[in-house]
Image: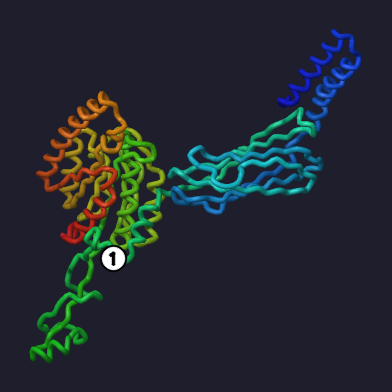
Amino acid sequence: MLTARGGVAIVTGVFILVFGFSTVNYFLVLLGVMFTIASVVSMPYFTLSASFEGVEVTRSLDKEKVFAEEFIHVTVTVTNKGRMRIDRLEVEDGYPEVFTLVLGENKISTRLDPGDEIKFSYVLQCRKRGVHKIGPTKLVMKDRIGVMFEEKEIPSYTEILVYPSYKDVRKLEALGAKRVLGKLFGVHRTRQKGIGVEFFGLRDYFPMDDFRRIDWKATARTGDLIVREFESERNIKVMLLIDCSSSMGGGLPDNTKLDFAIRAAVMLAKVALERRDEVGLAAFSDKVYQHVPPRPGKDYFYKILEALAFVEPTGGTRMKDSIEWVIKRSPKRMLYVLISDLEGDASDIVEAVKLIRAHRNHLLVLSPFGPWFEVYPEALSPVDRALAEAVSEELLEFRRKVSDELARMDVKVIDVGPDDFLPAIVSQYLNAKRRGIALR
């Protein structure tokens, strides 16, 4: 194929040739002929000699799984295993549009002798959660003077799994020990007498008590045998229900209701697993798309992260059918945390909540209010602001009716916006934990 430079060379040669004939200038005629012949004659020679058979391209990543907003280092190796020298080879490695090139270049122009190998690398920032593919690789081979070229695309892809952002958890970890969380969210243990490590209180000795639990100082003061009781923390099971219907995709770019719901789920899962609770996850809309049964353990956090990485807004809402599917696969007496904008059918929502309560489960409902996520009021014109207020009033009236129905079942709906979403879910969980919810 002809490059832009080759096209200019041919056009220039023809122009000089014509101009030379018109002015009877044989020097220009000769020059025009040389330009044209040099460009045209080189075409078949380059076409026959250009070959990508001996070119091998490999790609490696320093990580296959990363959190959103983190960086990956990509290294591309190009090897000439053929017998011919490649005078000019351009290599460009493709990457997803949602990634940002922050360091280096994803392309290179070089010459490769037989057996030569060259490497280049670049750094990408992974902006969006999910499974992404880096690739393909595009090869362009040019002749020495840059007149002709041949190109080939190598359909080689490298998958990378991008977890939801970890920045909120890092902020929480930076707060320090539990006493800091206690000031912010009211962290408390679920107090129950038993075998543990934290002191609970003193009581009179009973014949079946272990002698090692006798408090001899208290016994000396009172004259009666006194034993120490310790506090043990009862672990609960938490099931996160994430509404991933199309309406949850509303909001500003990268800050939709679903994005905040996932961030909240990540933070709650981290806090609950750190406190040795069992945590599970179900993401649903018209059906259950992701399901992770409740399990304990800090390593289980990555299982939940992996499921959240695949969650995207899609479909309508069939809450009752989805929750029924989850309940059949879950134990009783759980704490369900439902994150939904409640913009589906009111009767379907009420029936879903009835189903949860009928199985002796407890339920917390956090509901992102659409207008608070979709636009900033100051960015609207007076007319648009009036329309937005009308829509907000209509949504509020619908939510009041749903909230009243749920309140009759002792379920409170907590309306949240971008600013209070994350603190609300953690504080509600810790409050439920303190009150011993899902233990009875």
The residue nearer to you, when weighing 275 against 292, is 275
Q: Mark 1: few, some, or many residues within 10 Å (few <14, many ≥20)?
A: some
**Residue that appears at 20% across and 38% down:** 349
Residue 34's place in the image compared with 251, above or below, is above
Q: Quadrant of residue 217?
A: bottom left
**In which quadrant of the rendered image does the N terminus lie?**
top right
Report if residue 286 is visible in the image. Answer: no
The location of residue 203, given as percent across then percent down, is: 11, 80
The residue nearer to you, when weighing 439 against 129, is 129
Residue 399 shown left or right of residue 287 in the figure? left
The location of residue 224, given as percent across then percent down, is: 8, 89
Residue sitting at the far left:
223
**Residue that appears at 25% across and 76% down:** 197
Report the label total. Answer: 1
Residue 192 shown left or right of residue 373 in the figure? left
The location of residue 39, given as percent across then percent down, is: 81, 23
**Residue that appears at 19% across and 73% down:** 194
Q: By what rule are the colours in the image chosen?
A: rainbow
The location of residue 79, given as percent across then percent down, is: 72, 46
Q: Quadrant of residue 48?
A: top right
**Residue that appears at 28% across and 64% down:** 180
Badge 1 amino acid: Lys
Residue sitting at the far right:
26
**In which quadrant of the rendered image does the C terminus lie?**
bottom left
Report if residue 17 is visible in the image. Answer: yes
Q: Which residue is mark 1?
A: 178
Helix, strand or loop at mark 1:
helix
